[in-house]
Amino acid sequence: MALGALIGAYQEDEAGGLRALLPLAGQTLIEYQVRCLAALGAAPVLVLVDRLPVSLNDAFERLRSEGISVVAVSDAAEAASRFETGTDVILLADGIAPDMTDVARLGEGDDANGTDVPVILTVPDTEANADFERIDASHRWAGMARFPATLVGATAAMIGDWDLQSTLLRRAVQSGGRLFPAASGEGAGPFLAVSTAMAGFERRLLLASRGARDDWVSRFILPLPEELVTERLLETRLRPEWLVRIALALTLGAALAFTRGWLWQGLVALLLATPLDLVARRIALLRLRPLSPSYPAQRMLWPAAGLALIALGWFEARHGGGWGAMVAALAAAAFAEAMRVERSTVELPGAIYFFSRRAAIWLAIPFAFGGWWNLYLCFVALYASASFFVAQHYHHRVARG
């Protein structure tokens, strides 16, 4: 079934500006709301406005530049005319930053109720939820609902001077809408935007954006710098894809530096590259535009790191390390790739301690201080081969049942 969305953006905040324009995670609240609903495939996304200030129009232009169909409407009749017959509409109240769990639930619909029965998300009628709109003695509206587009048309025919989103809510309740509790618990549930509390919700989003850590460096060493860099860059217009490209450029630059004998410079470039793809992934998630696993620059980081390792082996082989340095570098690269293939086919216990790009880079630091680059190459060859054989052993044990 086709899915559309209607968002309110006309209420003012404490400072007299539009609540929809409050800053949130490097974007405005309205951009966050639209991206949440566009992620479900909702189109068009209508935004109900009384006036269209330049800053709000700029936000719409940024969204349109990403290919998101967002349209400003001024009244109920215009909103109703934009939805095709048979469309379901998700209503998102003015100033509500939704929980993505709730967004996904409404996007999936409720098969048990049928498509013509409105679904209304609620929060308990408690003191903590006093700012949410009351539905009855025990429920308040969580700011999201799903109902047929015909309800918008019927409401437009009788609304007069009433507030559209509140009238739609009342008609949804009166037509037998089902009440469902919104996500709850620490760090979950809808958030009613208030300028004095936006930093807390932004922090909640930052914590939620932490992905799985599949190597010991990203789990134990990089969390703090990753967090700091993410917070700083989130407020900028820097695109996450650029960070991955910078990481790739630093890695390739390190390979070139190794061939010229600039070993410390190459190592520093590699160290700077290690958190950038993690930061890029988090910023992309916070902007609700996740990076594709098949993104070319992301996929090239692994072979580029292997190239840097081989470049180091080549330099050492020509400057006192002999053929053994090159053999160790090639062996490390070959076993690392074989181990990566093994890991991709089965979940391995203790996988964070296996050989990884970041682990190989950070392990070079103590060897670099001692100038023991040949010893480092031997060590990473042993580390990669041991990881491969353990992964293969476990893989075949699983295969045997």
Image (spheres, grey):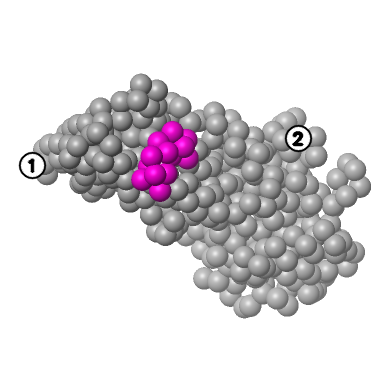
Q: Quadrant of residue 314?
A: top left
User: What crowding class fits label 1: few (fewer than 14 Cα within 10 Å), some (14-19), or many (20 or more)?
Assistant: few
Left/right placement of residue 295 relative to residue 66 reads left
Query: Residue under circle 2?
Result: 197
Specify which label sits upstream in the sequence, 2 or 1.
2
The C terminus lies in quadrant: top left
The numbered disc on residue 400 is: 1
Q: Residue at x 85, y 62 (%)?
A: 54
- In this rendered view, identify the residue nearer to me: 240 or 109: 240
- Label placed on residue 203: none
Give x and y (percent) for residue 201: 67, 37
**Where's residue 266, x and y in %?**
43, 39
Range of magenta residues: 256-269
In the rendered image, residue 262 lying in the magenta stretch gets the answer: yes
**Residue kind at label 2, given as amino acid type:** Ala
Towards the viewer: 184 or 95: 95
Nearer to me, 69 or 153: 69
Identify the image quadrant of residue 214. top left
Helix, strand or loop at label 2? It is helix
Q: How many numbered marks appear?
A: 2
Horizontal and vertical percent for residue 172? 68, 59
- Can residue 123 be seen here? The reply is no
Identify the residue shown where x is 73% and y is 66%.
61
The residue at the point 79 percent across, 64 percent down is 57
Q: Residue at x 62, y 65 (%)?
A: 66
**What residue type is disc 1 on?**
Arg
